[in-house]
Every structure is written in structure tokens, then in C-alpha cells.
Amino acid sequence: MFKTSFFLEGPVGGDPFCSRGEAAAQAIAGQIQGLAGYTQTRTLSEQVDPTSAPPFTGVAECWFVTEAAARQAEAEPAKLASLLTPETRVGPALSGMIRTVMRLPSFYDGGCIKGVFPFRCQDRLSVEGFQRYWWNEHGPIAARTEAALCYTQCHPSESRYADGRPPFDGITELYWPDAAAARAAMSSRQMIEEQATDAQNFAEPGSVILFLAEEEIVIPA
């Protein structure tokens, strides 16, 4: 599956979406061609670092069967207008293939907290070289994240770069059973030492963004 993630900006602590459930499903119906699923992700008021405001208020996540449909949606952010509050604007967007590195059966019990990590890769790496390392080398390390229930990577295709470098080169999503587990994992030795050290091999220093959020699956993909 392919996903286009639209990162949303607006008042801190506000809900960027104007509706939930069936009302949200009806609002997006017919707006985006080829849509196979839709998830509204809302940033939590309590983050890992309580002293800094989260960079985004949420993410509108549109799922597709084909890359072409995902790319087309990325180019038409205005079609999200009926889903968002007047104070919300669409910021960076990225489409790519979702690759699942690890997923436990308990993930399907629902009620998870999601950590969203968009980032840029180092300029010295080719797209193919970066994605190969992220998937084959870093993936198994991050899959050992403390108490994580699921770990996915979003890989934009090399053809995506023909239109210029995207705002992010990848998006990591990690799921935990609750916010306390997420915060404990972020301060664990495994995250601070193992993952952070290996990230120096492919991630641009200072480019990794993190925020905790909860997702509402409006249309299951």
C-alpha cells in the first residue's frame, strides 16, 4: 500500500479536524481519486519533551493501492479543505510505500499511541543507498524499541525525486500501548544509544522530528 501524509499546522493544542467518524468519511468521499483508506492523526497535548511545542497538530493520512494515486493526492492538498478547521493549514506532504518492519498481534487490539518521526537523509547517500540501509540495517535495530507494538517505514520512490527533493526522505511510525510506554521507550538506553548511534549513518543531523499522536481510522485501508 501507498500512503500520502499531509502534516497539519495550526493552533497548539487544537484539533485540526472538523469532524470524526462517519461525518469525516462523508466529507472526504469523492474528494480524492483512488482513495482506499483514510486516517486522522491528532497530536497529543502531552509530548516527550513537555517544554517544547509539537511541530504539527496532526496528520491527514490517505491510503492508496497505487503510487500514481498517492502522488496525485500529494499534489492536491486543497482537496482536504472540507476536513480541516479554518485555523488549520496543510504543511509538508510526502507520499510513499509503507513497509512494515515489525507488528505484534497485540497491535490489533487498538487504542495505541503513535510516534511519528519524519526526517531527511544525509546528502552523501543516494536514494537507493539510504533506503537500503534504513530498511536492512536500521530496521532490525529499531524493531527492538522498548514496548513497541508496530514499526513501519514510509519509502518515497526514486521517481518522486524527479520533481525535486521532497520535504522529508522518510517517515518512521512507532506504536506503543499508551503514552507512558512511549515516553519510557524514548528515554531508554536502546533508543538513546543503539538507535541514535546508528541513525548517524543515514539521517541528516538535527533533521529528525518527533511527536506523539493518536489515530482515528475513518476508512480502513
Image: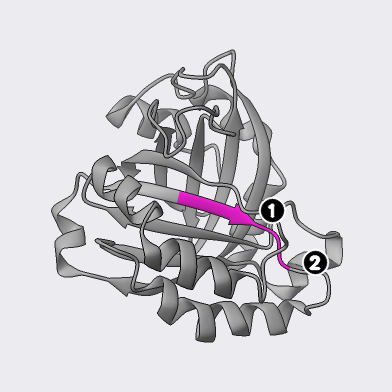
The answer to whether 126 is drawn above or below residue 23 in the figure is below
Magenta: predominant secondary structure element?
Answer: strand
Q: Is residue 161 magenta?
A: no
Q: Nearer the viewer, residue 205 or 189?
A: 189
Q: Earlier in the sequence, mark 1 or mark 2?
A: 2
Disc 2 secondary structure class: helix
Q: Is residue 28 left or right of residue 96?
A: left
The answer to whether 171 is drawn above or below residue 52 in the figure is below
The residue sitting at 70% across, 60% down in the picture is 120
Q: Is residue 154 left or right of residue 124?
A: left
Residue 66 quadrant: bottom right
| Residue type for callout 2 | Tyr
Residue 111 at x, y = what percent? 20, 44
Task: Specify whether residue 187 is in view.
Answer: yes
Residue 159 quadrant: bottom right
The residue sitting at 64% across, 53% down in the picture is 94
| Residue type for callout 1 | Ser
Where's the C terminus, which quadrant? bottom left
Residue 207 disc label: 1
Residue 161 disc label: 2
Q: Nearer the viewer, residue 171 or 39?
A: 171
Task: Specify whether residue 33 is in view.
Answer: no
In front: label 1 or label 2 = 1
Disc 1 secondary structure class: loop
Q: Nearer the viewer, residue 79 or 217?
A: 217
Q: Which residues are magenta?
A: 116-121
Residue 161 at x, y = what percent? 80, 66
